[in-house]
Amino acid sequence: MMLELLKSASLLEASIFFLLANLGIFAASVAFCWFLGIAFRHRRIFDRWEPLRGIELAAAFSAIVLNAAVSVAGWKLWTMGHITLHASGIGRAILDCGVMTLFMDLGMYFFHRVVHHPRLYRLFHRFHHRHESTNPISLFVLHPLEVIGFGSLMIVFLAAYPMSVPGLMAYLALNVLFGTLGHSGVEPFPERLRSIPVLGLIGTSTFHAEHHEHPRYNFGFYTLVWDKLFGTLDPEYEARFSGAARGAQDR
Ligand SMILES: [Zn+2]
Ligand SMILES: [Zn+2]
């Protein structure tokens, strides 16, 4: 089985595995972003994507390598027994995925607000905010400390919570999915999402795109829960989301 193979792998084998896995995640995210841009071209949030620049490609490559390094650190802690993973049925997997998503959303909300403090912003987070609009690699254009911070938060959670393997896989897939959606510049979610209980709290593409335009608002990633609770949801959010979902943006 894959997990047993991974557990008995050498450090070099695990490093190669996680580097390839993270390269694959990057490629899948970029390809999916291009697909979204074409499939939902009538529901644009921004007029166009920002052009790709060399420094951003370099930052994205460093994020891939650092994500792989964090994965190897998590793998090492797992092989040493500090992180426990177990098999589970679908019910437990959904519960675990929900718990991890809400925990990570709260943790990232908190750290995201902290790095918007003017001093820290200049040092770390300004790079991700180089543009008001985004492009298919924006998700990976992060300061190295942001990449390590995100990975460390995930490791802290996994060290404290006995996570099921399918729950973890589902969370990792959701993380890339939401990161890609938030930087795609288009709004694939239907307008009626807003009025559906619980689903209306999903962090849509418009939600994170607005953060790039108005960095005082929308610090969460997967949900609107923490921004609503702490009063930082962009007052224009509902109108912008509806407009983008209807394909009626006037920008
Ligand atoms: Zn962003
Ligand atoms: Zn930000």
Image (cartoon, rainbow, N blue to C red):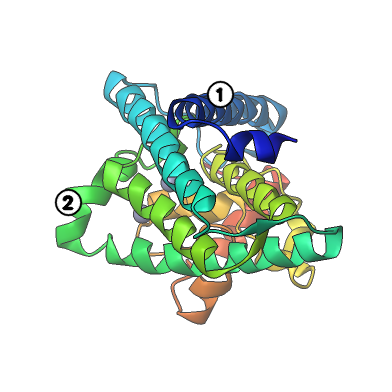
Mark 1 or mark 2, which is nearer the start of the sequence? Answer: 1
Tag shown at residue 174: none
Callout 2: SS: helix
* Percent of width and height locating residue 225: 58, 72
Q: Residues within 10 Å of mark 1 (few under 14, many from 20)?
A: few
The residue mark sitting in front, 2 or 1, is 1
Residue at (37%, 26%) from the top-left corner? 61
Nearest to the observer: residue 205 or residue 223: 223
Judge left or right: residue 179 versus residue 87: left
Residue at (25%, 47%) from the top-left corner? 126
From the Cβ of disc 2, is ligand 2 less than 8 Å away?
A: no
Alpha carbon distance from label 2 to label 1: 29 Å
Q: Is residue 148 above or below residue 153?
A: above
Nearest to the observer: residue 73 or residue 51: 73
Judge left or right: residue 8 versus residue 231: right
* Percent of width and height locating residue 113: 34, 66
Q: Is residue 162 above or below residue 123?
A: below
Callout 1: SS: helix
* Percent of width and height locating residue 62: 33, 30
Judge left or right: residue 247 versus residue 30: right
List the single residue furthest toward the top: 54
Residue at (54%, 38%) from the top-left corner? 185
Whether residue 120 appears in this view of the structure is yes
Whether residue 223 appears in this view of the structure is no
Label 2 sits on what residue type? Arg
Q: Residues within 10 Å of mark 2 (few under 14, many from 20)?
A: few
Q: Which residue is mark 1?
A: 27
Label 1 sits on what residue type? Ala
Number of labels in the image equals 2
